[in-house]
Image (cartoon, helix red, strand yellow):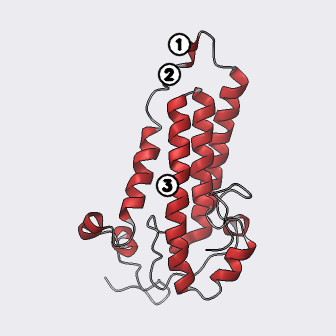
Amino acid sequence: MTPSPKSPPDAGVSPLRRWGLSWGGWRDNRRGEWWLLAQLLLIAAHLLPPWPAPGSWGYAWPLPLALGGAVLFLVGMGLALQGFLSLGASLSPLPEPIPGAALVTSGAYGRCRHPLYQAVLLCSLGVTLALGSLLHLGLLLALGAVLGGKARREERALASTHPDYAAYRHSTAAIIPRLPWLDWREL
């Protein structure tokens, strides 16, 4: 299939191939596949039931907290959609940028450098509050650690690929503004 003149050069290529996913990468982590795997496992673990169940503590989980958590989850989903749409063809689930992809610094990326990670953490916080689960609080903290590490690897690659990344990094919050480990302005 030959791309039309208006199509990007990789229009006929599957997203998995364009992102650089390969069996070899899953074995040796060449493009940061292990960061992605850890992220996906932690996100999937949010489907586990609350533990310990709030009722086992002898009281019902407060409805305002449960509703507030549900609202945070929905806000996180909206922010994720905004991040996906802002990133467009530069989207990759791996911490290595797609070769030749443009650096996106507007839209959701004008608010923070990693709005998709911010959205995932907001959804995780929403689930934690909605369920009142210590297990899910642990998953939220682990997800914060994994996404912080993944973002740092991603930024090293972006800084070596895009000369103007240093100025963007200096002026824009990483994931959560002013929160240690999730906001750094220098590497």
Instruction: Tell me which residue sits at (40%, 72%) in the image.
Output: 19
In the structure shown, which secondary structural element does the residue marked by tag 3 occupy?
A: helix
Residue for badge 3? 146
Q: Is residue 185 left or right of residue 26?
A: right
Q: Is residue 23 left or right of residue 136?
A: left
Instruction: Tell me which residue sits at (72%, 70%) in the image.
Output: 172
Disc 2 to disc 1: CB gap under 8 Å: yes
- What numbered label is drawn on residue 52? 2
Residue 113 quadrant: bottom right
In the structure shown, which secondary structural element does the residue marked by tag 2 occupy?
A: loop
Residue 129: horizontal and vertical position, in percent?
Answer: 63, 32
Residue 117: horizontal and vertical position, in percent?
Answer: 57, 57
Residue 133 vs 14, above or below: the answer is above
Spatial separation of the CA atoms under disc 1 and disc 3: 30 Å
Name, please, the residue furthest toward the top: 58
Instruction: Tell me which residue sits at (70%, 81%) in the image.
Output: 167
Q: Amino acid at mark 3?
A: Val
Residue 143 vs 86, above or below: the answer is above
Residue 169 vs 142, above or below: the answer is below
Residue 125: horizontal and vertical position, in percent?
Answer: 61, 40
Residue 183 vs 78, above or below: the answer is below
Q: Amino acid at mark 1?
A: Ser
Q: Quadrant of the N terminus?
A: bottom left
Residue 170 quadrant: bottom right
Q: Amino acid at mark 2?
A: Pro
Disc 1 to disc 3: CB gap under 8 Å: no
Residue for badge 1? 56
- What numbered label is drawn on residue 84? none
Which sits in the foreground, 174 or 72? 174
